[in-house]
Image: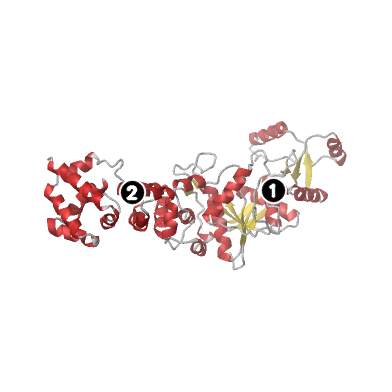
Amino acid sequence: MGTQPLKTRFAPSPTGLLHLGNVRTALFNYLLARASGGSFLLRIEDTDVTRGHDKYIEALQQDLTWLGLEWQEGAGIGGPHGPYLQSQRNAIYEDLFSALQARQEAYPCFCTAQELEIERKSQLAAGQPPRYSGRCYRLSDDERAARLRSDTPATLRFHVAADSTVEFEDHVRGLQRFGTNDIGDFVIRRSSGGAAFFFSNAVDDALMGVTLVVRGDDHLSNTPRQILILRALDLPVPAYGHIALVVAEDGAPLSKREGSSTIRELREQGYLPQALNNYLARLGHTSYDDSFMDLAGLAASFDLRHVSRSPARFDEGHLRHWQREAVNAVSPAEFWNWLGDGLDAWVPADKRPAFAEAVRTNINFPVDASEWARVIFSDEHFALTDGARQVLAGVAPSYFDQVLETYTACAGKFEDFALVLQTRTGKKGAAALRPVRLALTNRERGPELVRLLAIIPATRVRERLLAAKAIAAKQ
């Protein structure tokens, strides 16, 4: 990509909450801008006013901020190229439409939807690619003026010269060539007067100084049309990179309309932003550094040349891996804040640091910590499972006497507990400690036993060990 600072952008339409697929696009653009010392722009493409909602504009900005993807220009913060909501840029588009018509690069089209459909079916039946025939381009000035005077509904079409080729170097997919005979004249202004996506998206990138457009490969066929528009208007053409879409585990495309998890839902489940960033930065992108990184590190290791051309398959297991890495990486203050206020009612203030360190490596989400808080600091709903009772029933009652004696002897120095208990009982490893863990937590696995012994109230430790001894004594 060279050494010049890049200006990238994220240009969502506010028709729903952000999901992993479009946030991955935002992240890639952010990383490229940051790595080059450039800037990242946020533009809202809300020209379809029947579907856009202010609530989604606010929500997507909140999601980007939560992820740490700060934009230096655009919606919410302003800048020199505003307005940054396309619904407020109609006057700009109208001036450009007029310029194209004055240069005879665009013309009104009066064809009805029915006429266009008949034309399309005829072309397909003849084995031809469906494209507009240009019939309204061939109207005389008098015919065109008469239809305009009669208020016949009209779109505005961009005229594409025949027998030419549009070429550009895609920074993901390599050299791309499109024949203009396969493109045909296309609509740039709808009959309602609104700018079509091809047009507003292209001219806004140019007018806002965007130098690199990274977007989904579903837009690849749009690119030659947009290049033609920008050349006709003598506007700068940005570089392009088209990335493969993210698909679900079953191969279906991720979509906010198909029930895929939104960023808001993932946040509510307890995912950390650092986990999502580390996962998405590697989704369809090969990084030679597979360690957990902050955004600066991810930016330094990101390279468009290492982005796959094949669809990137969402893998929840990989996302959970990065969630574990993120949980282990955050500071103690961030960790406790992430756990939430709900734990305050369970964990005494003087035990919170020790509790946090005890459970950190054994949880993925705040709900997991809540479960451990109830186990450690409450007897409510603490009932041994049948499996735990079966294990405890196979232990000699004298074993629990030795456990209690060891617990008393090691009070305040629980790092010695396992060694002392093994010496007293003659048992090694899991055989010596498994019954203790089950008696105290009703679980086979969990935080280090030495950490649990330091924070479970002593009376509760004794009560649970005595209860376990009673189970053993009944056999």
Pick the quarter of the image with the C terminus. top left
Q: Residues within 10 Å of mark 1 (few under 14, many from 20)?
A: many
Q: Check the image and report above or below for 466 versus 175.
A: above
Residue 76, horizontal then vertical, whole percent: 64, 53
How many numbered discs, if any?
2
Secondary structure under the numbered disc 1 in the rendered image:
helix
**How far, Cα to Cα, is label 2 from label 1?**
50 Å
Pick the quarter of the image with the N terminus. bottom right
Q: Check the image and report above or below for 112 versus 446.
A: above
Is residue 25 found left or right of 103 in the rendered image?
left
Residue 273, horizontal then vertical, whole percent: 48, 54
**Foreground pick, 225 / 400:** 400
Q: In the rendered structure, which amino acid carries the disc numbered 2?
A: Trp
Q: Check the image and report above or below for 413 versus 12.
A: below
Q: Which mark is residue 86?
A: 1
Q: Residue at x 73, y 49 (%)?
A: 89
Is residue 124 found left or right of 232 in the rendered image?
left
Q: In the rendered structure, which amino acid carries the disc numbered 1?
A: Gln
2 or 1: mark nearer the eye: 2
Q: Earlier in the sequence, mark 2 or mark 1?
A: 1
Residue 362, horizontal then vertical, whole percent: 34, 53
Q: Residues within 10 Å of mark 2 (few under 14, many from 20)?
A: many
Secondary structure under the numbered disc 2 in the rendered image:
helix
Is residue 460 found left or right of 58 in the rendered image?
left
- Which residue in the structure is indicated by mark 2? 372
Q: Residue at x 34, y 49 (%)?
A: 373
Residue 68 visible: yes
Are the residues tagged 2 and 1 within 8 Å (C-beta)?
no
Q: Quadrant of residue 5?
A: bottom right
